[in-house]
Image (cartoon, rainbow, N blue to C red):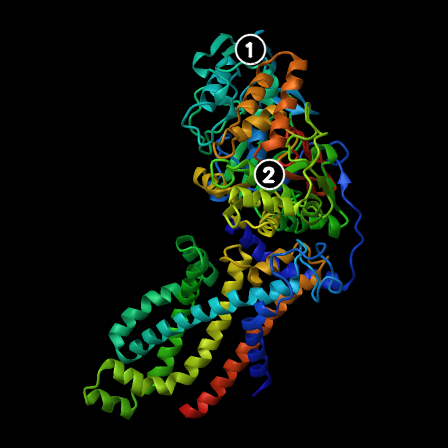
């Protein structure tokens, strides 16, 4: 495995078992506020004297799980629309236009709008999916366009195979690589958006990394670790996912060629 | 809705993150400690003073009686004048010069200031005050006024152009204190709408532009009875997020930011021409929670006592105020006349709290603590409170909402505990204001009797005894947990001066403010 993949797997394992590993409850004060790393925990304490390490470990799951769900929903929906658009010209265009309109709205605005209507975790997932789907559809349509004119696809259509069969059996395997790579990029975008929701105070329930960042801002000079830890973890997650996604693209090109 | 100001914050967040990390690497700055007071020097005439306060987002209103946030209070106070205001702990006349109650308190006569003109040029008089009092106590008001319970506004008599007789529903022994505490902004006779363009006050500044949740621009009113103000223009910015207010001053978009994070006092102002100011010990705000006695299990006095015992007051002061404050004794109104400062703060006793909860059958009961960050540290205190209450066996959780949402009747009714800050207001206000909301009131016959006596009597000794009784009832079985007194900190350009504290340093009077 490449280093990026190793880092990603390690990070995901940490996120999954993090809450169990945390030395303290994420809400319990364990020392004076803004204690530097050392006496009161490996990463010091936050503005209320809570253990930063425990909070960071507990704050990963909401970010990663929400991001993953949102990215998955957006990718599946976007890929379905993109594939249909590639095969059915007119219907496809009809399907793509509204999505293009959504793509023109900045993701953070989509997030704010959706959360106004559907507050809570499901709202964030919906917003992430909605923000990601149009671009996935574009990528899928572009990747599938050269494939649909291939002989085996036309043969399948001529045999009278159904739409689902053609897309699933003949087209999808050939564009799967780019789609997986794109899903990786979507996931990074999703993590950013979930973090932004936490940062804007729109996160649901437990404190996620975004909320940890905004809470640590006023005291960043007093206790830099409380700010640096969640920022670095978000960055690390994004970079390793991107590198792994790049890797997938590189390999999938050889399949396509 | 916090989104707008937070978005501003988002914009500057990258810079701040980078800047903070760089600053942190460069070593911790020396903390000079806050400067006491409101800035020295005499303000010069002219200039634009931009001040940032927490607001209520798009729901902000130009109606001075609809507001509930510092930005709205500060704006209203600059546009309108009050009948009386609190100054150095005593009521001082503004548009009213005196109020004489009859011996039995059944009515009083208000003598109004002469020679005052409205911003549209018309003269101010008794009809305006009568209209204001009627409007203030009308049932259509968005927020109930504590005065509704006292004034018989239907029977107000205009005696002459500058004299009004106001009959009371309950005896009122000291009308100036009642008015000063209630902060009565006087409206022009006939005022019913508050759209931009219709707003006319007698105050030192005229409203020229208003964008709810963003800013209000106010221009100097040269005809003000108290002398023309100093700054040509006053800009009141609404920024909910304390860090966004700080950033606005540091980035040069504002000259003054009130109610800034306590952490900032430790980190320093950030630039040589900026200073952190503290409004001082006498202006400390009481931070606490009002328990909703209409809800189970808080309705049980044993549970209320357990909640008090569960709080580690000194730990809360250390964590929320970072030491810029002191522990309090569960009573609001410290620093004013008749305050019972000698009542001891309840001890921190987890074992006894658990026992009491067990006796009341409330162990494991769900408990919602509602808070909004309209004053710095409220949300932090709500989170710590939830943790303290979980430690004694209550299923407590902090529900953090936006300032506008917090004050909706539904939201108040759904809260078991409400984060509630009160500055050094007169006790008549302290007790009447919380009683104006059914979910914040405390129905206790002895307390009601004592408050009624204290408000009705014209005899000072009798009033003093009555307030003593009221506070003893509150300390014994009441519905307040006032855990600390926090300093009011602001970040200001060193040239900003003349910011006056009337009834609360959280929403100062800017009528005499300016740039030195």
Q: CA distance from mark 2 to mark 1?
A: 36 Å
Of the numbered discs 2 and 1, the one sitting upstream in the chain is: 1
Mark 2 lies on residue = B305
Q: Position of residue B232 (x, y in %)?
A: 63, 33
Number of numbered callouts drawn: 2
The reply to whether discs 2 and 1 touch (Cβ–Cβ < 8 Å) is no
Q: Is residue A139 above or below residue A205?
A: below
Q: Residue at x 42, y 61 (%)?
A: A122
Q: Position of residue B311 (x, y in %)?
A: 64, 44
Residues at discs 2 and 1 both on one chain:
yes
Q: Is residue B172 above or below residue B259?
A: above
Q: Position of residue A184 (x, y in %)?
A: 48, 77
Q: Within 10 angstroms of label 2, few (less than 14), some, or many (20 or more) residues? A: many
- Residue B457 in sight in this render: yes
Chain bearing tag 1 is: B
Q: Residue at x 52, y 39 (%)?
A: B298
Chain bearing tag 2 is: B
Residue nearer the viewer, A151 or B106: B106
Mark 1 lies on residue = B105
Q: Position of residue B502 (x, y in %)?
A: 65, 28
Describe residue B84's horizontal placement relative to residue B143 as left or right.
Answer: right
Is label 2 in a helix, a strand or a loop?
helix
Is label 1 in a helix, a strand or a loop?
loop
- Quadrant that contains the C terminus of chain A: bottom left
- Residue B223 in sight in this render: no
Q: Residue at x 62, y 40 (%)?
A: B308
- Quadrant that contains the N terminus of chain A: bottom right
């Amino acid at each position: 495995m490449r280093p990026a993949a190793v880092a990603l797997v390690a990070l995901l394992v940490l996120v999954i078992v993090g809450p169990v590993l945390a030395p303290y409850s994420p809400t319990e004060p364990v020392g004076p506020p803004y204690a530097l790393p050392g006496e009161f925990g490996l990463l010091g304490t936050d503005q209320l004297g809570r253990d930063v390490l425990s909070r960071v470990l507990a704050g990963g799951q909401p970010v990663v799980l929400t991001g993953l769900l949102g990215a998955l929903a957006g990718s599946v929906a976007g890929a379905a629309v993109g594939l249909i658009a590639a095969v059915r010209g007119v219907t496809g265009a009809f399907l793509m236009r509204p999505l293009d309109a959504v793509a023109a709205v900045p993701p953070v605005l989509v997030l704010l709008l959706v959360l106004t209507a559907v507050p809570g975790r499901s709202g964030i997932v919906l917003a992430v999916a909605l923000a990601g789907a149009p671009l996935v559809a574009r990528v899928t349509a572009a990747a599938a366009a050269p494939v649909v004119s291939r002989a085996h696809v036309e043969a399948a259509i001529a045999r009278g195979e159904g739409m689902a069969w053609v897309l699933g059996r003949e087209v999808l395997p050939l564009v799967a690589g780019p789609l997986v790579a794109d899903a990786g990029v979507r996931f990074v975008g999703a993590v950013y958006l979930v973090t932004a929701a936490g940062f804007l105070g729109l996160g649901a329930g437990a404190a996620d990394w975004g909320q940890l960042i905004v809470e640590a801002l006023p005291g960043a000079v007093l206790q830099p670790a409380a700010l640096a830890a969640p920022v670095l973890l978000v960055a690390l997650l994004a970079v390793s996912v991107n590198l792994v996604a790049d890797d997938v693209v590189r390999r999938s090109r050889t399949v396509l060629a | 809705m916090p989104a707008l100001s937070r978005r501003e914050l988002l914009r500057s967040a990258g810079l701040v993150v980078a800047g903070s990390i760089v600053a942190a690497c460069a070593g911790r700055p020396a903390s000079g400690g806050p400067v006491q007071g409101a800035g020295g020097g005499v303000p010069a005439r002219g200039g634009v003073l931009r001040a940032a306060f927490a607001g209520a987002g798009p729901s902000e209103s130009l109606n001075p009686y609809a507001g509930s946030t510092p930005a709205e209070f500060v704006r209203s106070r600059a546009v309108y004048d009050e009948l009386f205001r609190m100054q150095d702990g005593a009521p001082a006349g503004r548009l009213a010069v005196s109020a004489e109650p009859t011996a039995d308190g059944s009515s009083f006569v208000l003598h109004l200031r002469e020679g005052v003109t409205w911003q549209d040029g018309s003269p101010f008089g008794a009809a305006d005050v009568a209209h204001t009092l009627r409007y203030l106590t009308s049932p259509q008001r968005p927020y109930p006024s504590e005065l509704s319970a006292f004034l018989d506004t239907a029977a107000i008599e205009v005696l002459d152009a500058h004299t009004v007789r106001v009959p009371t529903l309950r005896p009122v022994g000291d009308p100036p204190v009642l008015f000063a505490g209630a902060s009565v902004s006087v409206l022009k006779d006939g005022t019913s709408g508050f759209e931009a363009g219709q707003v006319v006050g007698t105050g030192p500044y005229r409203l020229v532009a208003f964008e709810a949740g963003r800013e209000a621009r106010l221009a100097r009113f040269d005809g003000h009875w108290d002398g023309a103000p100093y700054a040509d223009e006053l800009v009141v910015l609404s920024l909910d997020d304390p860090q966004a207010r700080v950033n606005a001053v540091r980035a040069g978009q504002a000259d003054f930011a009130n109610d800034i994070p306590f952490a900032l006092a430790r980190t320093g102002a950030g630039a040589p021409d900026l200073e952190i100011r503290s409004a001082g010990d006498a202006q400390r705000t009481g931070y606490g929670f009002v328990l909703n006695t209409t809800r189970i299990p808080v309705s049980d006095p044993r549970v209320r006592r357990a909640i008090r015992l569960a709080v580690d007051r000194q730990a809360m002061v250390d964590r929320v105020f970072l030491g810029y404050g002191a522990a309090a004794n569960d009573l609001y109104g410290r620093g004013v006349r008749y305050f019972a400062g000698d009542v001891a703060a309840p001890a921190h006793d987890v074992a006894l709290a658990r026992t009491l909860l067990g006796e009341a059958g409330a162990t494991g009961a769900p408990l919602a603590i509602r808070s909004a960050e309209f004053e710095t540290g409220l949300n932090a205190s709500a989170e710590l409170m939830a943790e303290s209450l979980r430690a004694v066996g209550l299923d407590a959780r902090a529900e953090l909402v936006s300032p506008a949402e917090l004050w909706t009747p539904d939201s108040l009714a759904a809260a078991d505990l409400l984060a509630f800050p009160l500055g050094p207001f007169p006790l008549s206000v302290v007790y009447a204001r919380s009683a104006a909301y059914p979910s914040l009131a405390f129905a206790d016959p002895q307390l009601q009797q004592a408050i009624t006596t204290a408000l009705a009597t014209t005899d000072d000794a009798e009033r003093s005894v009555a307030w003593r009784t009221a506070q003893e009832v509150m300390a014994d079985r009441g519905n307040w947990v006032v855990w600390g007194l926090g300093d009011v900190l602001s970040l200001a350009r060193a040239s900003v001066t003349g910011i006056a504290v009337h009834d609360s340093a959280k929403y100062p009077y800017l009528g005499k403010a300016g740039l030195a």
